[in-house]
Structure formats: structure tokens, C-alpha cells
Image (tube, rainbow, N blue to C red):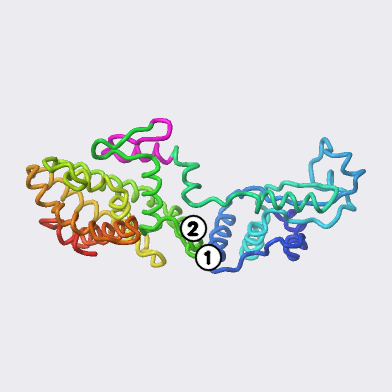
Amino acid sequence: MRDYIALVRDAHANQGGISGQRDVLKTTTAKRIRSRMVNDIRAGALLPPVVIGAVVRPEDFANLPREGATNVADFLPKDAGALSIIDGMQRTGAMLEAIDADVSVSDHMVRVEFWLAQSVRAMIYRMLVLNTGQVPWSLGRQLSVVYAPLLKEVEANVATLDKVFTPDSPGRRRGPAQYSSDVLVELYLAFSLRKTTTEAKEALSEEFSRLDFVENVSESNFQNHFYNALGLMTGLDIAFSRYETGGAQRLSKGRHVFDSQPARIGFMAAVAQHALGRPGMDRLPADRDSRMAEIMTEGLALVQQLKALTSEEVGRFLALDVLSDVLQKRVGQVGRYERTVFFDAFKVLVEEHFALTSMEPCWRAS
């Protein structure tokens, strides 16, 4: 890292050495994320390669690549133009901060790619293709790229799951504890962000959502908290589904409660907010663990109580007629309204320690 910093220090001080290249970001969230990166570097993390560009003469370019080169001086001409940081301004800034905090970090390894061109236009093209020519990924899309291993972990850690439908193995929910892969990915996002609206439209709120997500998944027990919450929801889904004597309308059977994605998201967000804290007011890890353990103990106790009831008694507990009346309210944004209803409902259930004789107070909370 010492050699890399010596090579690019001037370029970094000059906004990467390319007109229009963004400087090190100075927003509050960027500083906090860079602080995490600094800590990771000091701990020995190996970051993705930074990309360094240089303009060389045509005759030197014709001699590339140079076989047997073992260091930069072996292939980079001495009269090459000023170096430019095409990609890696934020990582370079984090490296400088890490070295300032602990000079021994300069002995760490860093991966560097070199983009040698005959004109600065080629370097600008490289920067545009890498940084701005791509379609920005939402959090959901980023998760969808990795949801195959995520789903494997979910199935391995949530024993009450019955079926998981995927694009390669499609299907329809015909019973409790059956969900599509897209549903599980969205629940993972809702649990991490601790809110029912998982698609932030404003740039600032999206930035804070990204920060919340990064900070939550870095906690060692976060995944277990998610699996426990999903397992509890699945247990309630199965217990509610014991009421099957209703009619053909939308909310006539117990299974119909968690047929709804707003209900599933409302439950996960309510549990997450109680256990992890409100967005921007994160609880300490020990507090998170104790709260989640309390939720699991109380929630599973309710599941066992429901299992001991008859189908008709489960129906009276669910009070689906009250829920149906609440959801029939005419509103402009039905999906958002329903998510709010279920979030408020399950928030009451959690705050009352799952010790209710009926869900009516929950459905009437919003």
C-alpha cells in the first residue's frame, strides 16, 4: 500500500486527475461508511482493485504488455503522463485515513489495475463505462444477485418453512409457510431497514437506507435475528391457518392473514423495529439479543396456545371480521395503507408481549 499511495498521492489530491471525477464524498453517511472501510482496512481487509490510468506515447503503447514485469517501473514508461485514479477515489481516501491512524497499515497489500491509453479520451471512456454508464442497482436488485445462497440459508435455518417458490421452480401459495423467493428477499430488506416501505424514492432516504442496511448486516447476530423472526412469522402463519371454516371472501380463513405481503412485511418490520431499534436509533448488540430472545419466547408461547385451541376458537381469536372492516376503507394508495395497518397491528402484538385474547386491539390500532 505504501508504494500505491506514493504513486497516486498527487492524483488523489487533484480529484483523481480527471476533470469531472468526483472528489472524496463528504456527506454524513459517506463519512460513516468510509469510517467503516478504514476500520476494515486496518483489520487487514483486501478491497476490490482500484483502477489507475495513464496516457503513454504511441510507441510505448505498442510495446505493451511487457512480459516479465514485476513492478510498476517495469511497464510504466518514465515519461508517462500524470496518473489518474479512474476508479477508487473513496477507497484511496480510506487508505490515507487508515495510514494516518496506524502507519503499519502501509505494509498491507492492495490490488491495483492499470489502464494505459494513448489519449485521455480513452481514460474518460473507461471512467464513464465503469462509474456512470451502468444502471444503478437498488438494494433489492443487489440482494437478488445473491439471493440464491440467501435462500439456501433461509431454508436451512427456518425449519417451519414448507415451500419456497423460485423462478426456476414456480408455484402458488396453497397453504401456510409457503412463500416465493421474491417475497423472502423483500422481507429480508424490510427487516433490515425496519420499515414497511422498502423502495426509497428520494435520493437522501435511499442513501440512509443503504447505510442502515450496511450497518445491520455487519452485526454478527443480525442473520440469526432475521431467521428467528421469519420462523416466528411462519409459526403464526401455520397456527392461524388452523381456522378453515370461513367462506370464500378475501379474509374468511386464517391462512388469508399472511397471504398478504403487506401483512408479512408489517410483521417483520414491527419485530425488527422493536428488537433492533428505530432507523437512526440502533440498539446495542446485547439489547438487541435480549429483546429478540424475549420476542421469540413470548411469540412461540402464543403459537403453542393457538395450537391447543379448536378451529372455531382460533377464528374468534383472529377477529377477521374486524380486520376486513378496517381494510375496506377507501384510500388512494391501498398497498401503503395496508402495510401501515399491519405494521401498527403487529407492533401492538409485540408491545403487549403476544398476551392477547383477541387480535381485535391489533386490527384497530391504526
The front one of 333 and 345 is 333
Contact between marks 2 and 1 (CB within 8 A): the answer is yes
Q: Residue at x 11, y 52 (%)?
A: 317
Q: Secondary structure at mark 2?
A: helix
Tell me the quarter of the picture where residue 346 sits: bottom left
Q: Which mark is residue 29?
A: 1
Q: Residue at x 37, y 63 (%)?
A: 284
Q: Is residue 320 magenta?
A: no
Q: Residue at x 16, y 46 (%)?
A: 252
Left or right, 277 with respect to 141, comes to left
Chain part drawn in magenta:
150-169
The front one of 3 and 209 is 209
Q: Mark 2 — residue? A: 210
Q: Which amino acid type is marked by label 2?
A: Arg
Left or right, 175 with respect to 108, comes to left
Q: Is residue 167 magenta?
A: yes
Residue 293 at x, y percent in the picture: 26, 54
Q: Secondary structure at mark 1?
A: helix
